[in-house]
């Protein structure tokens, strides 16, 4: 990792260092994905089968996963992984169930009652990546809040062949409609519907650049579907002082770097000696990783930033707005009020980012690419829509009507004024 002293850099150099790299071949990507979406819209399942044959390892004629396939997947898995998935689901369910909001009912003035209510989004689509690292954890993070919210239809797409762990997790979360199709074509199928795959109202889940681009395009089409959040490559920023364990810091950096060669990994520290120790630990640990080539490529474009103190470290993190923020300092909670713009924060030496990825209970679907400035981590509210209710008594309208008439006249909206005036006249 490249090491730089933060306060020796000019402001434009600092901004450049914290900027995410542009997506490679963005114009070609946009055009390719647009073509895929158009094909799926035009030819439905036939297009999905052709695209699956072109892009997936195990194309199949029947897209929906059968009950027998679920049974076989569960039978092949050992009890240890099944128990781990069940326990993780339990923790995720506990944390997300606590997010449920009661009906808010308030009388803003006598006779004027306002309410804030929620209802589930009717149909949701979940995308779970497969490939070299199938992610049953993503199934849990997406499907548990969908069930708690009460979404009436849940559709899950994952590349073929669907892993045993993904199928077991889906069933354990109550998801029955699973389709073995991946990529941009899966996003298009859920956004517009095909003969086999139902159209959904909102799509959740991470994916490669094609999936990300497809989500962007369908979310901008009124006929398409909403999405959970914009996304980019996964990332972590670690703030550490001289008290941090360099082996722990290195392990956390590598756990993010192994996601992909474009993963973003940043260490910010006020301890130069620790930076050197982390560099050495990275070399030692990297040698033993099964995904060392991927992690090594990510590290080559990653940074260690030497700062003056922890206040400056917090300012750097706030400017970067990381997906994951790990704080390994002597008193990590003392920094919490100074930290902004992070998708999820991990405090102290015994809280690796891995626990949030899998089983602590928080959601690992987080804003990346700097979107943590404006977007939140996934939660129960993302599967619901809020709406308001108001009810006035006759006395309430008498008290409020003159205010409404006055503002309506100021805006030149006579029909608005008249809707109140007629009622007030009827009350005399």
Image: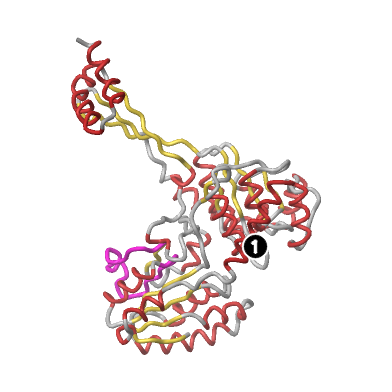
Taking the view exactly as shown, the residue that stands out farthest to the front is 412
Residue 196 highlighted magenta (yes or no): no
Residue 342 highlighted magenta (yes or no): yes
Rendering coords of residue 319 (x, y %): 35, 70
Residue situated in front as seen by the camera: 71 or 327: 327
Rendering coords of residue 322 (x, y %): 42, 67
Taking the view exactly as shown, the residue that stands out farthest to the right is 61
Rendering coords of residue 386 (x, y %): 41, 38
Q: Residue at x 51, y 65 (%)?
A: 232
> What colour-coding does the image apply?
secondary structure
In this view, 381 is above or below 290: above
Residue situated in front as seen by the camera: 242 or 118: 118
Q: Residue at x 40, y 68 (%)?
A: 325
Q: Quadrant of the C terminus?
A: top left
Q: How many marks?
A: 1
Position of residue 300 in the picture relative to residue 316 (left or right): right
Q: Residue at x 32, y 79 (%)?
A: 11
Query: Disc 1 on helix, strand or loop?
Result: loop
In this view, 361 is above or below 14: above
Figure quadrant of residue 31: bottom right
In this view, 93 is above or below 275: above
Figure quadrant of residue 134: bottom right
Position of residue 121 in the picture relative to residue 208 (left or right): left
Q: Which residues are magenta?
A: 322-343
Q: Report which residue position mark 1 lands on.
A: 134
Rendering coords of residue 266 (x, y %): 43, 77
* Other-residue count near label 1 (Cα within 10 Å), few / some / many at <14 / 14–19 / ≥20: some
């Amino acid at each position: 990792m490249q090491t730089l002293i933060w306060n020796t850099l000019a402001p434009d150099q600092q901004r450049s260092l914290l900027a995410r790299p542009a997506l490679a071949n963005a114009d070609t990507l946009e055009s390719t994905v647009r073509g895929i979406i158009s094909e799926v819209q035009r030819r439905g399942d036939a297009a999905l089968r052709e695209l699956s044959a072109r892009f997936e390892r195990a194309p199949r004629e029947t897209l929906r996963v059968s009950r027998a396939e679920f049974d076989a997947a569960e039978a092949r898995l050992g009890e240890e992984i099944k128990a781990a998935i069940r326990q993780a689901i339990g923790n995720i369910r506990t944390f997300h169930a606590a997010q449920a909001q009661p009906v808010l009912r308030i009388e803003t003035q006598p006779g004027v009652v306002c309410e804030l209510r929620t209802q589930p989004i009717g149909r949701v689509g979940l995308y779970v990546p497969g490939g070299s690292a199938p992610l049953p954890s993503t199934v849990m993070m997406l499907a548990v809040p969908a069930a708690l919210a009460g979404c009436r239809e849940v559709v899950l797409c994952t590349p073929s062949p669907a892993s045993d762990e993904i199928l077991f997790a889906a069933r354990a979360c109550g998801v029955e409609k699973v389709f073995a199709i991946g990529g941009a074509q899966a996003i298009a199928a859920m956004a517009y519907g095909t003969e086999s795959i139902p159209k959904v109202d909102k799509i959740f889940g991470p994916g490669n650049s094609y999936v990300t681009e497809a989500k962007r395009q369908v979310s901008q089409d009124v006929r398409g579907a909403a999405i959970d959040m914009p996304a980019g490559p996964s990332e972590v920023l670690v703030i550490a002082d001289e008290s941090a364990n360099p082996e722990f810091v290195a392990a956390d950096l590598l756990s993010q770097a192994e996601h992909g060669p474009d993963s973003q990994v940043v260490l910010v520290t006020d301890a130069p000696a620790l930076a050197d120790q982390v560099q050495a630990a990275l070399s030692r640990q990297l040698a033993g990783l099964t995904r060392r080539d991927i992690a090594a490529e990510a590290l080559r474009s990653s940074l260690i930033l030497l700062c003056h103190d922890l206040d400056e470290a917090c300012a750097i993190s706030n400017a970067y707005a990381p997906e994951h923020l790990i704080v390994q300092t002597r008193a990590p909670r003392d920094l919490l009020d100074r930290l902004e713009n992070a998708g999820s924060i991990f405090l102290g030496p015994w809280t690796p980012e891995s626990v949030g990825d899998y089983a602590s209970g928080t959601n690992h679907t987080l804003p990346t690419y700097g979107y943590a400035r404006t977007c939140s981590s996934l939660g129960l509210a993302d599967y619901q829509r809020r709406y308001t209710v108001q009810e006035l008594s006759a006395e309430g309208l008498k008290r409020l009507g003159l205010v409404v008439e006055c503002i309506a006249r100021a805006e030149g909206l006579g029909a608005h004024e008249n809707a109140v005036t007629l009622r007030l006249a009827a009350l005399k």
